[in-house]
Each structure stands twice: as structure tokens, then as C-alpha cells.
Image (spheres, rainbow, N blue to C red):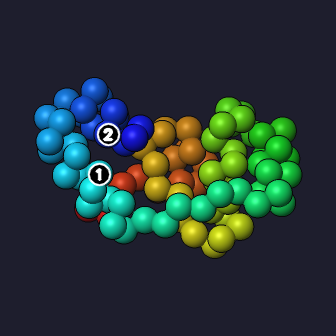
Amino acid sequence: MESRSVLTEKQRLERSTAEGATDDIWTHVAVYTPEPSDRVAAYERQRESSLHTVGCPPLETADGLDAELVTLDAEPLDHGASSPTTFA
């Protein structure tokens, strides 16, 4: 849902174009929820960095899965996440 908002509001795409893009994205992603160990690691990462609290669990979950976090959020991008444009 947030990706659609970013595409329509910040990238100024038409809603139908944004819907098509997000539909395509969802065919290529897997969604995971943080494990308890990811939450502990996220807390430690937040203590050791300047990241906002909400940015840490997705980064730690990706690390725990040996996966790549893809985001439009600048803060996680500065801490190891990848931009969707990397895959375009």
C-alpha cells in the first residue's frame, strides 16, 4: 500500500500506472515477519546506529533470511538496503 502512495504522491504517477507497477512488484517479492531474534537484533542495531526504530526490524529480518531488503526509504538505503531502481 505504501508503495502505491509513494508512486502516486511523490513520483506523480497516475493511479492506474501505479497499480500496474505494484501488481508487477508483488509477483516478484516474498513477505516475511520478524522472528523474535530479529527483534532483539533490531533493538541492538537501533542502539548502535542513528536509524529510526521502524527501520531496524526490516533490515534485521532481511539479514536473518540472507535476503535483500528493497525499499524507497532513504534511511535503510543508507544502511545496506537496495533501491528498486537497482533491479530495473
Q: Is residue 7 above or below residue 20?
A: above
At 68% from the left and 32% from the top, the residue drawn is 52
Q: Quadrant of residue 55?
A: top right
Sooner in the amino-acid sequence: mark 1 or mark 2: 2
Q: Is residue 83 left or right of residue 78?
A: left
At 71% from the left and 67% from the top, the residue drawn is 64
The residue identified by callout 1 is 22
Q: Is residue 56 left or right of residue 11?
A: right
The residue identified by callout 2 is 4
**Residue type, label 2:** Arg
Q: Quadrant of residue 75?
A: top right
At 24% from the left and 32% from the top, the residue drawn is 8
Q: Is residue 86 visible?
A: no
In this view, the residue in front, 52 or 13, is 13
Residue 34, how many percent across, how many down? Answer: 70, 56
Mark 2, residues whose alpha carbon is within 10 Å: few (<14), some, or many (≥20)? many
**Residue type, label 1:** Thr
Where disc 1 sits, the SS reads: helix
At 40% from the left and 41% from the top, the residue drawn is 1
Where disc 2 sits, the SS reads: helix
